[in-house]
Image (cartoon, helix red, strand yellow):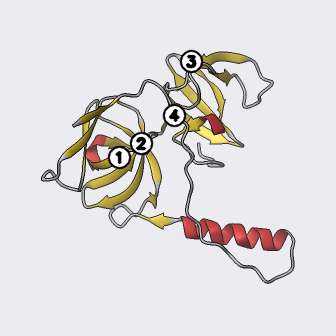
């Protein structure tokens, strides 16, 4: 059994598998709009248990949770997650179990009550390069704090490539591209 420690963040690109779309109509805005619609529909897989989108991000509700090799207590424990609020990605469902993946690409099956729909992120990057937290969603806006890679922050919403975060008593906006726990271009409030 290995414990997961969330001290340093590791950048991990999340790629959604979307089938290629062929369009034989005239080029232009209509064609681009149709392609985007078809890609969004293909990416909108739903979980067989909850009916919620797969994959999707959640956070760890419990301060300690076992990640097992399969969906049941008969399966061995591969990881023990020990940080409440850490972001996890649900990639499959089976009855009361959710298959998750963390920012390192590791994962397993966790009992559904150990997870929370509240969103959080891990700040990614090199330890030597703290990420700016701005007072507005603009790179030219005042910096209210710097976030060290590996910090877990609560997400209050994302729009136009920026996410509003709360971490260790500070609140502000960080660029979405330096966060693991939100999809590229994802927007929500």
**How far is mark 3 from mark 1, CA to CA?**
30 Å
Residue indicated by mark 1: 107
Q: In this view, does 34 lie to the left or right of 166?
A: right
- Label located before the other in sequence (3 or 4): 4
Q: Position of residue 170 (x, y in %)?
A: 56, 18
Q: Element under label 2?
A: loop
Mark 3 or 2: in front is 2
The picture quadrant where one finds residue 163 is top right
- Residue 148 or residue 29, whichever sits in front: 148
Q: Where is residue 127 in the image (x, y as percent from the top left)?
A: 56, 21
Q: Element under label 4?
A: loop
Please tell me how crowded label 4 is: few (under 14), some (14-19), or many (20+) other residues with Cα within 10 Å.
many
Q: Quadrant of the N terminus?
A: top left
- Residue 65 or residue 76, whichever sits in front: 76
**How far is mark 1 from mark 2, CA to CA?**
6 Å
**How far is mark 3 from mark 4, CA to CA?**
22 Å
- Label located before the other in sequence (3 or 2): 2
Q: Where is residue 76 in the image (x, y as percent from the top left)?
A: 17, 48
Give yes or no for contact between labels 3 and 1 (Cβ–Cβ under 8 Å). Answer: no
Q: Element under label 3?
A: strand
Give yes or no for contact between labels 1 and 2 (Cβ–Cβ under 8 Å). Answer: yes
Residue indicated by mark 3: 170
- Label located before the other in sequence (3 or 1): 1
Q: In which quarter of the image is the C terminus?
A: top right
Residue indicated by mark 2: 102
């Amino acid at each position: 059994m290995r414990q997961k420690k969330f001290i340093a963040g590791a950048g991990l690109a999340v790629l959604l598998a979307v089938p290629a779309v062929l369009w034989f109509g005239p080029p232009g805005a209509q064609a681009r709009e149709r392609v985007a619609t078809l890609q969004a529909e293909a990416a909108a897989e739903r979980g067989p248990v909850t009916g919620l989108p797969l994959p999707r991000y959640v956070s760890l509700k419990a301060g300690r949770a076992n990640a097992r090799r399969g969906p049941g207590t008969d399966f061995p424990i591969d990881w023990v997650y020990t940080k409440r609020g850490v972001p996890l990605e649900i990639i499959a469902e089976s009855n009361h179990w959710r298959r998750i993946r963390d920012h390192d690409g590791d994962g397993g099956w966790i009992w559904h009550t150990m997870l929370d729909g509240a969103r959080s992120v891990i700040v990614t990057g090199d330890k030597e390069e703290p990420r700016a937290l701005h007072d507005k969603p603009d790179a030219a806006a005042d910096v209210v704090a710097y976030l060290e890679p590996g910090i877990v922050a609560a997400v209050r919403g994302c729009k136009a490539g920026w996410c509003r975060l709360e971490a260790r008593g500070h609140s502000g906006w960080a660029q979405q591209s330096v966060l693991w726990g939100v999809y590229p271009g994802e927007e929500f409030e």
